[in-house]
């Protein structure tokens, strides 16, 4: 079986960590079928090309076609955005036509995240009568998200709705996102296929013996992730316990200033964006991962930490209850309350040796491994072919 994937986000030379969760889904699916991914990425500064350039990478049954385009600019922002969108659609459709010329017409395609690749999926359905599956991850559908879908203009939202509602079936990475989307868009057919963890990278190792508590936080460090509350909570326990926080992500100057103002310069270590291999090494030596998000649709770092045998400290979000069980593989704390988070950190420090780290790792590996998630995609494809 050969499946064409259209990905709105995907790792590239310009953005090596964007949509890496989609790439992991592709790797899982490619264990059972041939997957060809088409991803079009805007090369604003012409670092890769002065016009259009395609780079193809093949990993066994996974073929990735990343197409870079340099947008036309006339220095009028709304005109530049329009011209960029026109070129994106032209490049994306040309890539699909090339695929159709080299392969049999597919029974369906698999779209990952509605915008912007969904415009191509919608065109493909209407012009060539090729239906599509939609897998959605994006948190911007949630009312509490900033920004969210309501911040886009009417035309954009109208296309977005058409892309979602014209999908043959929708898959979501969590029950929480599925429930919201089904209610909002009146979706008839949907299932949940969670994110995946690479257990070849994320697995337990023997920890170094140190007399310090080691916390890790991994995120984009934006409003959604609420890093300021984590730092504030840590400042409230800094005089009681010896700890360090390894911070992974792009740190703003405002966040650096907050670390200084809270007197955490010797406790918080900024690492920037790094590879999964480097993240795994840090997690394997950690006592806990902290993820104090305001909203989420899943939380890949949670299953990565758990796969390393590391418990997690998370905000009280419904979606996290799909992954975390209190006192088993993590602990919950009410959101938007740095004092409560500080108290939970103290509680964790006193109880950290009560967690069954071997059991945590085994459970995560069993639930979220590539083979299991890949099999779910194969079952989906086989069921679609029967309809």
Image (cartoon, rainbow, N blue to C red):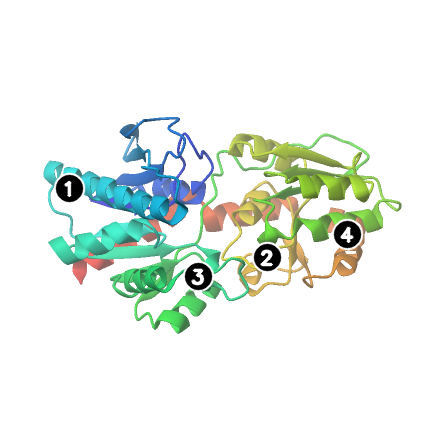
Lower sequence index among marks 3 and 4: 3
Viewport quadrant of the C terminus: bottom left
On the rendered structure, is 286 left or right of 29? Answer: right
Q: Nearer the viewer, residue 181 or 32?
A: 181
Q: Which residue is mark 1?
A: 97
Q: Residue at x 45, y 46 (%)?
A: 196
Q: Which residue is mark 2?
A: 324
Q: Nearer the viewer, residue 39 or 80?
A: 80
Instruction: Name the image quarter holding residue 259.
Output: top right
Viewport quadrant of the N terminus: top left
Could you tell me how far apart the alpha carbons at marks 3 and 2 are, in whole angstroms?
A: 28 Å
Residue situated furthest right in the rendering:
239
Lower sequence index among marks 1 and 2: 1
Could you tell me how far apart the alpha carbons at marks 3 and 4 are, in whole angstroms?
A: 31 Å
Between marks 3 and 4 in the image, the one whose residue lies nearer the viewer: 3
Between marks 4 and 2 in the image, the one whose residue lies nearer the viewer: 4
Q: Which residue is mark 3?
A: 149
Between marks 1 and 2 in the image, the one whose residue lies nearer the viewer: 1
Helix, strand or loop under label 4: helix
Could you tell me how far apart the alpha carbons at marks 1 and 2 are, in whole angstroms?
A: 44 Å
Contact between labelled residues 4 and 3, with CB atoms less than 8 Å apart: no
Q: Which residue is mark 4?
A: 233
């Amino acid at each position: 079986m050969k499946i064409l994937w259209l990905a709105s986000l995907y790792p590239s030379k310009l953005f090596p960590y964007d949509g890496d969760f989609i790439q992991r889904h592709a790797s899982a699916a490619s264990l059972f079928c041939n997957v060809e991914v088409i991803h079009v990425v805007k090369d604003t500064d012409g670092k890769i090309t002065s016009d259009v350039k395609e780079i193809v990478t093949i990993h066994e049954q996974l073929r990735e076609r990343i197409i870079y385009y340099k947008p036309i600019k006339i220095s009028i922002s709304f005109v530049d955005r329009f011209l960029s969108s026109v070129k994106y659609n032209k490049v994306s459709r040309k890539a699909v036509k090339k695929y159709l010329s080299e392969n049999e017409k597919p029974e369906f395609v698999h779209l990952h995240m509605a915008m912007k690749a969904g415009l191509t999926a919608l065109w493909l359905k209407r012009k060539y009568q090729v239906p599509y599956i939609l897998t959605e991850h994006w948190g911007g559908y949630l009312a509490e998200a900033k920004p969210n879908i309501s911040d886009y203009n009417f035309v954009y939202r109208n296309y977005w709705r058409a892309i979602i509602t014209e999908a043959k079936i929708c898959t979501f990475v969590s029950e929480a996102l599925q429930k919201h989307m089904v209610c909002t868009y009146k979706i008839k057919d949907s299932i949940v296929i969670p994110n995946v963890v690479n257990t070849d990278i994320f697995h337990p190792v023997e920890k170094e013996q140190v007399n310090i508590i080691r916390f890790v936080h991994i995120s984009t460090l934006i409003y959604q992730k609420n890093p300021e509350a984590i730092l504030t909570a840590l400042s409230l326990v800094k005089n009681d316990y010896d700890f360090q926080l390894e911070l992974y992500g792009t740190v703003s100057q405002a966040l650096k200033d907050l670390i200084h103002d809270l007197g955490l310069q010797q406790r918080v270590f900024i690492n920037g964006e790094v590879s999964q291999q480097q993240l795994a090494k840090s997690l394997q030596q950690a006592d806990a991962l902290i993820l104090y998000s305001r909203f989420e649709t899943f939380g890949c770092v949670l299953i990565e930490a758990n796969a390393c045998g590391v418990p997690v400290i998370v905000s009280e979000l419904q979606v996290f209850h799909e992954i975390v069980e209190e006192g088993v593989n993590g602990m919950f704390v009410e959101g938007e309350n740095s004092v409560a988070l500080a108290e939970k950190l103290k509680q964790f420090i006193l109880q950290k040796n009560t967690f069954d780290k071997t059991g945590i790792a085994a459970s995560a590996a069993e639930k979220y491994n590539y083979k299991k998630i890949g099999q779910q995609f194969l079952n989906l494809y086989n069921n679609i072919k029967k309809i």
